[in-house]
Image (cartoon, rainbow, N blue to C red):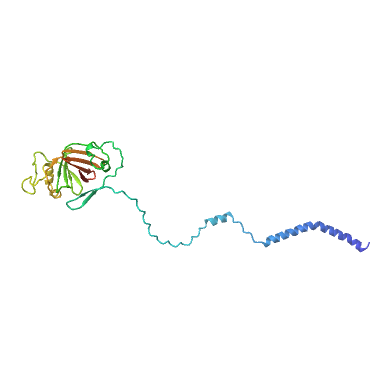
């Protein structure tokens, strides 16, 4: 056998063995190519661990840049108030010093139903329950004495004697009132004094309990002055207490005086 015939079988065996191993080589090369391609890309960002996340959350946030202070704005003008209905007032001019006292009626809910009715003889007083509230007691018809002081015809100072209380009420020209105990007795002089000289009843001077109280205080004499005529009882008197004070109606001939004597020690009078 020649050399060529011997070599062919060996070449054929080598090729057969190489062909059997080819798939493994191809697979190995493919894997090398994939690894090379992965290695040539960008590095992956590592996933932060829970500890790192917690540390990041606990870091204090950086303060933002300071904001420039806003310019001060002028205060807004208040909204226009709703129109308020004017409230009727009663004024009393003080003759002694020229000042004026102002009395505002009580604020009472309109249309209120009162358990006690006001006396029929007080119906002439304007806006009775709106200015005094509801009656709290029945009206009294006991005798009441009256004496005006100073110059008329519109008097701004009075003395009133309430027989059921035996008290004297002085209504001062500044719109205040004060009550005093009547200490005069029938055994005492009718005219306790006459600081002006002359006869006790000339000029007319306060008498009985009014006169005793008037004579006891020279300052009271100066404030009240003298009387234009003597004291007398109201021909018909009605006194009733209301929520805000008392209202007295003193009837004399064709004149009715409504005295509003409030619990805050102020008073006013309406003449009809």
> Which quadrant: the C terminus?
top left
Would residue 249 appear left or right of 10 to someone viewing this image?
left
What residue lies at 56% left-to-right and 55% top-to-bottom? Answer: 53
Q: Is residue 25 left or right of residue 48?
A: right
Estimate the x, y position of residue 154 in percent, counting from the top left: 17, 47
Q: Residue furthest bottom?
A: 3
The residue at 24%/49% (across/down) is: 102
Residue in the image at 20% along x and 41% along y? 248
- Considering every residue shown, the one lying at the far left of the view is 198
Expressed as whole percent of the image width and height from the top left, the position of residue 260 reads 22, 43
Q: Nearer the viewer, residue 269 or 8?
A: 269
**Quarter of the image where one finds residue 76:** bottom left
Depth order, front residue of 107/80: 80
**How far across and how far down the image is residue 126, in percent?**
24, 43
In-front residue for pair 222/146: 146
Q: How many marks?
A: 0
Residue 27: quarter of image:
bottom right
Residue found 91% across the figure and 63% down from its top: 4
Q: Is residue 209 above or below residue 45?
A: above
Quadrant including the N terminus: bottom right
**How far from the left and from the top, in percent, is residue 199?**
5, 46
Q: Is residue 266 positioned above or below 136 on the image?
A: below
Drawn side of residue 28 relative to residue 139, left or right: right
């Amino acid at each position: 056998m020649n050399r060529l015939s011997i070599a062919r079988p060996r070449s054929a065996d080598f090729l057969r063995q190489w062909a059997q191993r080819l798939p493994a080589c191809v697979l190995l090369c493919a894997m090398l190519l994939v690894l090379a391609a992965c290695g040539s890309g960008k590095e992956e960002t590592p996933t932060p661990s829970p500890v790192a996340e917690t540390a990041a959350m606990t870091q204090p946030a950086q303060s933002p840049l300071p904001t420039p202070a806003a310019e001060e704005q002028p205060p807004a003008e208040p909204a226009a108030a709703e129109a308020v209905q004017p409230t009727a007032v009663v004024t009393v001019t003080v003759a002694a010093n020229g000042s004026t006292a102002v009395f505002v009626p009580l604020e009472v809910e309109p249309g209120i139903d009162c358990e006690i009715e006001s006396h029929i003889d007080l119906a002439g007083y304007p806006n009775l329950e709106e200015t005094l509230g509801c009656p709290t007691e029945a009206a009294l018809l006991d005798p009441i004495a009256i004496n005006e002081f100073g110059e008329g015809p519109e008097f701004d100072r009075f003395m009133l004697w309430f027989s059921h209380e035996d008290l004297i009420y002085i209504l001062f020209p500044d719109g205040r009132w004060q009550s005093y105990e009547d200490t005069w007795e029938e055994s005492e002089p009718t005219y306790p004094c006459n600081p002006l000289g002359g006869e006790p009843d000339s000029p007319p001077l306060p008498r009985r309990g009014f006169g005793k109280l008037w004579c006891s205080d020279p300052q009271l004499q100066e404030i009240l002055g003298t009387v234009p005529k003597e004291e007398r009882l109201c021909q018909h008197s009605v006194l009733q207490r209301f929520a805000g004070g008392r209202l007295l109606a003193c009837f004399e001939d064709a004149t009715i005086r409504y005295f509003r004597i409030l619990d805050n020690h102020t008073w006013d009078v309406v003449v009809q």
